[in-house]
Amino acid sequence: MSREEIIAKIKGIAENEKFKIDAFFFCGFPSGKPNQELMKACEKFIEADEADKADEAAVNALIAEMEAALKAESDVAEKDNITSSNEDVKLVLANKAVLFA
């Protein structure tokens, strides 16, 4: 995958987590438990990338938060959840070398 495709996935993860936060406040938990830390890590990386300041520390912080998010969620529980970001997170992690370029 290209860097642009990975960045698009990261933006999608941030948007998905924001949706879950909004849905939580309006309706309870209809869309799965929101992950504010993951959303903030994605947004911080995107901001740094857009300012051409996405250094190794920014990438490592994003990767650490994504790995923590996967450990916190059960694949079985997330399998039928259409708002789950797990598959996109796994895809970004599988292609994380692109982020260091």
Image (tube, rainbow, N blue to C red):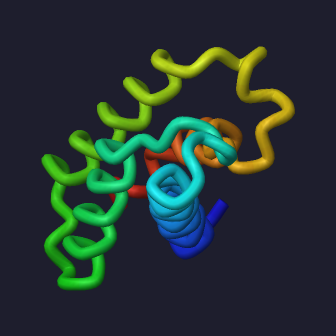
- Residue 42 rendering spot, x and y as whole percentages: 36, 57
| Front position in the image: 15 or 100 | 15
| Front position in the image: 60 or 98 | 60
Q: Is residue 58 visible?
A: yes
Is residue 90 found left or right of 66 in the rendered image? right
- Residue 23 rendering spot, x and y as whole percentages: 56, 58
| Front position in the image: 11 or 91 | 11
| Position of the C terminus by quadrant | bottom left
Query: What is the quadrant of residue 12 in the picture?
Result: bottom right
Point 70% across, 40% down: residue: 87
Point 59% across, 40% down: residue: 29
What residue occupies the far right of the structure in this picture? 80
On screen, residue 76 above or below 57: above
Is residue 57 found left or right of 26 in the rendered image? left
Is residue 4 found left or right of 25 in the rendered image? right
- Residue 2 rendering spot, x and y as whole percentages: 60, 67
Point 33% across, 35% down: residue: 65
Is residue 85 found left or right of 34 in the rendered image? right
Point 66% across, 60% down: residue: 1
Q: Is residue 10 visible?
A: no
How many tags in the picture? 0
What residue occupies the far bottom of the structure in this picture? 51
On screen, residue 34 above or below 98: above
| Front position in the image: 57 or 64 | 64
